[in-house]
Image (spheres, helix red, strand yellow):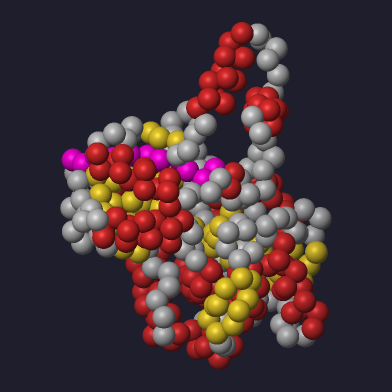
């Protein structure tokens, strides 16, 4: 059904059609609208049978999901930013136990300093936690990824994060094709857990494993993620057959067939990048874009296939690995091992800073002209940074940088 709706509500409605039996909820912006809408659906009786549990923290939310999933229930939760960090210990337990929990993450910066706007710092910090990570390009794909996430999670018995940009997508109203219950039922079979706590057949889960077997257990976790590389495109194709539209998969190339320069991105900025690619193509510039949907597992072969014929690659990052620079870039370099081409890492959009077409045009022109550094911070205010560095060098008690920067910004207005 095509309707004008908010991204969060489209996702919540789609999740409800996946028939979750337990939802653990703890609100945090910009995730709150997911659990609010699901609460309304449970209370109204539109989603039943479902146990909706208001918990006291994000750690409790994931702990509740672990218990519910281990008991054989289809389980869902959502979080963002500091909430995801509060879950960390339980995140590793969920993946280590092989529990097929699905969680939406409304991507948001992590502090300090405090910031509620969008970047990918939160989920990137948990890229090695053992969860599959799927990044949505738009709200249609954000909704569509959830039935696929449940299929994938339950087929492989692995937890899945569906990552969508906070506020940029979660709070945007647009026309979205929200699926019908019959369509989701045709695509997503009833949950049959691979492992379940049963009083009639008692087992232990989460037992201590010593050095004699720990490597093998971790290898099996890796092997299951490698299986996901085959399952993700297959499930996306089955989704297309049922719903009549393409969503999900491993990667999405755009105008890459003859491109000499290819821009690699995750998430909603892909649309803006494609607009700039179109405008530059009109000038005769051979440029393309590649969106990576599956960041974990990372699709090395698919990325290598798309990028291998280019002369240079620009990776647009929405998170910063302090002390080294790029996160996605490191994975892209692994995919391109042995292929000689110029590579550039661009840190952009941190803490919700707009990534404009004007800035992207300048950035891509610099890349094509050979003026781009290996590591670039898009639209960095160097005057502010240099002023703070000088202040820090002048006196040991220079004060907190965040507050100093805010004062400097205020004085310039």
Assign the N terminus to one quadrant of the image. Answer: bottom right
In this rendering, the count of numbered labels is 0
- Percent across and percent down for residue 176 are 54, 77
Queried whether the magenta region covers residue 344, the answer comes back as yes
Q: Which of 402 and 30 is in front in this view?
A: 402
Say above or below: 121 vs 233.
above
Let me know if residue 372 appears in the view: yes
Q: In the shown orientation, is residue 199 left or right of residue 283? A: right
Report the residue at 47% width, 43% height from top.
Answer: 348
Let me know if residue 198 appears in the view: no
Q: In the shown orientation, is residue 220 left or right of residue 143? A: left
Say above or below: 23 vs 185.
above
Assign the C terminus to one quadrant of the image. Answer: top right
Q: Nearer the viewer, residue 154 or 381?
A: 381
Q: In the shown orientation, is residue 42 left or right of residue 393? A: right
* Region of the chain picked out in magenta, as a range: 340-350
Report the residue at 43% width, 58% height from top.
Answer: 272
Q: Which of 241 and 150 is in front in this view?
A: 241
Report the residue at 55% width, 85% height from top.
Answer: 2
- Percent across and percent down for residue 66 are 66, 61
Say above or below: 331 vs 305.
above
Say above or below: 413 vs 186.
above
Q: In the shown orientation, is residue 358 left or right of residue 384? A: left
Which residue in the rendered view is the most extreme toward the front? 413
Image quadrant where residue 38 sits:
bottom right
- Percent across and percent down for residue 181 are 59, 88
Queried whether the magenta region covers residue 117, the answer comes back as no
Report the residue at 75% width, 69% height from top.
Answer: 36
- Percent across and percent down for residue 214 are 49, 45
């Amino acid at each position: 059904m095509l309707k004008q709706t908010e991204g969060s509500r489209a996702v919540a409605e789609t999740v409800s059609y996946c028939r979750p039996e337990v939802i653990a909820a703890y609100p945090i912006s910009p995730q709150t609208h997911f659990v609010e809408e699901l609460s309304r659906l449970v209370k109204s009786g539109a989603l039943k049978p479902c146990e909706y549990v208001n918990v006291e923290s994000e750690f409790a939310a994931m702990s509740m999901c672990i218990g519910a999933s281990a008991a054989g229930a289809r389980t869902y939760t959502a979080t963002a930013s500091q909430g995801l960090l509060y879950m960390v210990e339980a995140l590793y337990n969920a993946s280590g136990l092989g529990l097929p929990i699905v969680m939406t993450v409304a991507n948001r910066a992590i502090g300090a300093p405090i910031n509620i706007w969008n970047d990918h710092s939160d989920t990137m910090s948990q890229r090695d936690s053992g969860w599959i990570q799927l990044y949505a390009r738009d709200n249609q794909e954000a909704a569509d990824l959830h039935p696929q996430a449940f299929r994938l999670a339950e087929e492989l018995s692995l937890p899945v994060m569906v990552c969508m940009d906070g506020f940029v997508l979660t709070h945007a109203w647009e026309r979205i094709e929200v699926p019908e219950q019959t369509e989701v039922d045709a695509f997503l079979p009833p949950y049959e857990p691979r492992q379940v706590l049963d009083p009639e057949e008692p087992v232990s889960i989460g037992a201590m494993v010593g050095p004699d077997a720990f490597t093998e257990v971790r290898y099996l976790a890796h092997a299951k993620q490698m299986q996901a590389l085959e399952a993700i495109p297959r499930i996306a194709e089955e989704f297309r057959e049922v719903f009549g539209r393409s969503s999900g998969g491993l990667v999405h190339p755009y105008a890459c067939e003859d491109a000499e320069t290819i821009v690699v991105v995750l998430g909603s900025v892909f649309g803006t990048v494609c607009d700039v690619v179109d405008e530059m193509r009109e000038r005769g510039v051979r440029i393309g874009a590649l969106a990576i949907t599956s960041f974990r597992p990372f699709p090395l072969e698919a990325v290598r296939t798309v990028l291998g014929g280019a002369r240079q690659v620009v990776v647009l990052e929405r998170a910063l690995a302090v002390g080294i620079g790029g996160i996605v870039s490191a994975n892209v370099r692994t995919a391109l091992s042995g292929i000689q081409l110029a590579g550039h890492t661009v840190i952009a959009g941190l803490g919700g800073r707009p990534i404009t077409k004007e800035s992207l045009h300048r950035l891509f022109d610099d890349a094509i002209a050979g003026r781009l550094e290996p590591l670039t911070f898009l639209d960095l205010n160097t005057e502010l940074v240099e002023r703070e560095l000088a202040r820090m060098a002048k006196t040991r008690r220079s004060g907190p940088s965040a507050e100093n920067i805010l004062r400097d910004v205020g004085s310039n207005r």
